[in-house]
Amino acid sequence: MNKLAEFSKTTLIGGFLILLPIYLSVLLLLKTLQGLLALVAPVTAQIPAAVEFRQVFAVLIVVAACFVAGLLVRTGPIARGVGSLERNLLEKIPGYSLLRGFASRIGGREDAATFEPALVEIEDALAPAMIIERLPDGRFTVLVPSVPTPAAGALYVLTADRVHPVDVPLHKLLKVYSKWGEGMAELVAAAKIAPRIV
């Protein structure tokens, strides 16, 4: 009876830990979309009532606004202003740099210097990680995220011979974390330098 109770408890907790991040992600996405749609509600209210699919127009307006904002941020004076705002205000907000780095990598900006997928040697094991920074002396600062959420983890400063960049997009590395390690074989095969530990 004790084993059954322990099994039930661990199964329930495990299921909760899987469903909670999914629920929170969907909730955050829906709340964000709801807020954006509320912002464009005055514009969509101007569309005649006979026109169907007002929500589709609202979503298209939000997408167009995101595109225009992204385009403006790439121009000289605005890019400098945004850079100054980020350095002086936004980077002081906990988690902002992490989310921005993720967004840059996932958005296809592979020139982004942070969050490069890698395998790192820690003691006698390989761990999937993200390169945060290359130090002037040749060492690396790496983040080894926790499973199943890569938003937290441990920071290490490792020598270059213990850090092996992996030629995969960041989203594949994040998927390995969210799937509790499933897909690691692809990361090991894609290592740019063969790790000594396999």
Image (tube, rainbow, N blue to C red):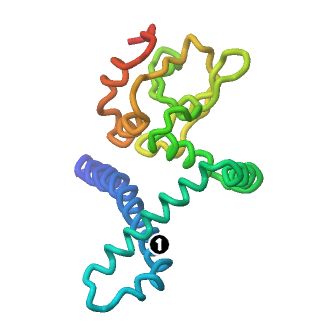
Tell whether 135 sits left or right of 142: right
In this view, 91 is above or below 179:
below
Of residue 17 and residue 162, the one placed in the foreground of this image is 162
Residue 139 visible to an observer of this rendering: yes
Question: Residue drawn at (33%, 90%), measured in percent from left and top?
Answer: 48
Q: Is residue 84 above or below residue 129?
A: below
Q: Position of residue 26 (x, y in %)?
A: 37, 63
Query: Residue placed at 63% from the left, 22% from the top?
Result: 140
Disc 1 target residue? 36
Identity of the residue drawn at 45% across and 45% down: 149
Badge 1: how crowded within 10 Å, few (<14), some, or many (20+)? some
Quadrant of the drawing holding the C terminus: top left
The residue furthest top is 196
Q: Is residue 164 above or below residue 67?
A: above
**Front position in the image: 142 or 181:** 142
Give the quarter of the image for residue 163. top right
Give how far across and how far down residue 54 sits, in percent.
32, 80
Amino acid type shown at disc 1: Leu
Estimate the x, y position of residue 147 in percent, counting from the top left.
Answer: 43, 40
